[in-house]
């Protein structure tokens, strides 16, 4: 029986990190291995910035591409032997399969928790209601220092200046979806769910900020409303009386 990560001491988690590192050295190409190490370092940096458990984040990031270099036949066999359901999308376009298989390996071989498995499972597609761990793994994978190109550069900048949601939204809108359309591929439904979820929450918070500003303008100490400076036949709430409201585009 594999010991579960949540039952491990900090020392045992560090030993597991070394064990996974050794396994990856043996099974991945050097390029993929270096990408895994670099993703782990970036994820650790984000874990520090966002006050997350560093060892959990590092273990997950290091393992995220463990299944990436299996062949199609190996995927099919592994999925069959381990009762992993490959859906219609996986059969047409296999981009998310290594996440599914990787999450299973992480559980059966290393005792990863459900949260860690899910971050591996969704690291290519994202999903609605992403956890902090999902977000960190998704972004560390795309912004680690070995990733070259304009899109990685821009995403790093957004991640430095904004929050995790800003960066995920930026990646989906300006990189992932345009690239999928250009190459005539399918957009994974989870990618659309992730975008809608983040955008809907952002729109909600923008709306409530707006309402708060309106209340502040209307009920500030010197407000017209309090002083009662309303001309005859003019509504107290006429926008023409409230230049500040015009700026809010309501
Ligand atoms: Fe991957
Ligand atoms: Fe990766």
Image (cartoon, grey):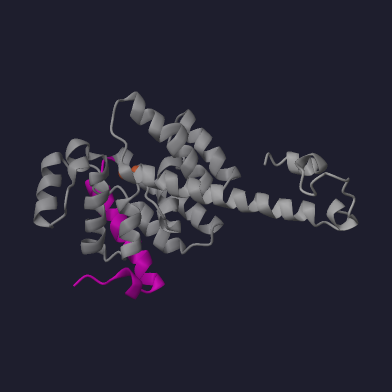
86 vs 116: above or below = above
Above or below, comparing residue 108 to residue 167 in the picture: below
Given residues 144 and 130, the one toward you in this image is 130
Compared to 24, does 91 lie above or below?
Answer: above
Q: Is any part of residue 146 visible from this angle?
A: no
Q: Residue at x 55, y 40 (%)?
A: 158
Identify the residue at horizontal 40%, vertical 47% (top origin): 194
x, y percent for residue 119: 35, 55
Q: Nearer the viewer, residue 44 or 125?
A: 125
Left or right relative to 174: residue 6: left
Q: Position of residue 156 (x, y in %)?
A: 52, 39
Which one is in front, 98 or 11?
98
Going by the image, does 246 lie left or right of 49? right
User: How many labels sit on residues?
Assistant: 0
Q: On the rendered structure, is 77 left or right of 99? A: left
User: Residue 26 lies in magenta, yes or no?
Assistant: yes
Q: Which range is magenta? A: 1-29
In the picture, residue 212 is in which quadrant?
bottom right
Name the residue at 55% across, 47% down. Answer: 203
- Quadrant containing the N terminus is bottom left
Q: Position of residue 209 (x, y in %)?
A: 65, 52
Residue 133 visible in the displayed image = yes
| Residue 47 lies in the magenta stretch | no
28 or 232, nearer to the observer: 232
Q: Main secondary structure of the magenta part?
A: helix
User: Residue 144 appears at what percent x and percent y?
Assistant: 45, 42
Identify which residue is drawn at 67% across, 42% down.
250
């Amino acid at each position: 029986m594999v010991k579960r990560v949540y039952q491990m001491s900090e020392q045992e988690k560090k030993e597991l990190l070394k064990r996974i590192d050794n396994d990856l050295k043996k099974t991945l190409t050097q390029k993929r291995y270096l990408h895994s190490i670099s993703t782990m370092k970036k994820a650790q940096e984000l874990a520090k910035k966002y006050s997350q458990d560093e060892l959990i984040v590092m273990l997950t990031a290091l393992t995220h591409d463990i299944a990436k270099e299996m062949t199609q036949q190996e995927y099919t066999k592994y999925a069959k032997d381990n009762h992993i359901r490959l859906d219609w999308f996986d059969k047409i376009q296999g981009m998310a399969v290594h996440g599914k298989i990787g999450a299973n390996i992480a559980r059966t071989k290393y005792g990863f928790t459900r949260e860690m498995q899910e971050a591996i499972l969704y690291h290519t597609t994202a999903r609605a209601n992403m956890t902090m761990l999902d977000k960190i793994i998704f972004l560390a994978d795309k912004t680690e220092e070995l990733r070259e190109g304009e899109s990685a550069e821009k995403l790093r900048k957004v991640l430095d200046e904004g929050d995790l949601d800003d960066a995920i939204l930026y990646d989906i809108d300006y990189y992932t979806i345009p690239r999928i359309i250009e190459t005539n591929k399918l957009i994974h439904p989870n990618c659309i769910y992730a975008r809608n979820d983040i955008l809907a929450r952002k729109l909600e918070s923008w709306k409530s900020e707006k309402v708060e500003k309106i209340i502040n303008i209307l009920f500030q100490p010197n407000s017209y409303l309090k002083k009662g400076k309303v001309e005859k036949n003019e509504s107290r709430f006429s926008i023409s009386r409230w230049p500040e409201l015009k700026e809010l585009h309501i």
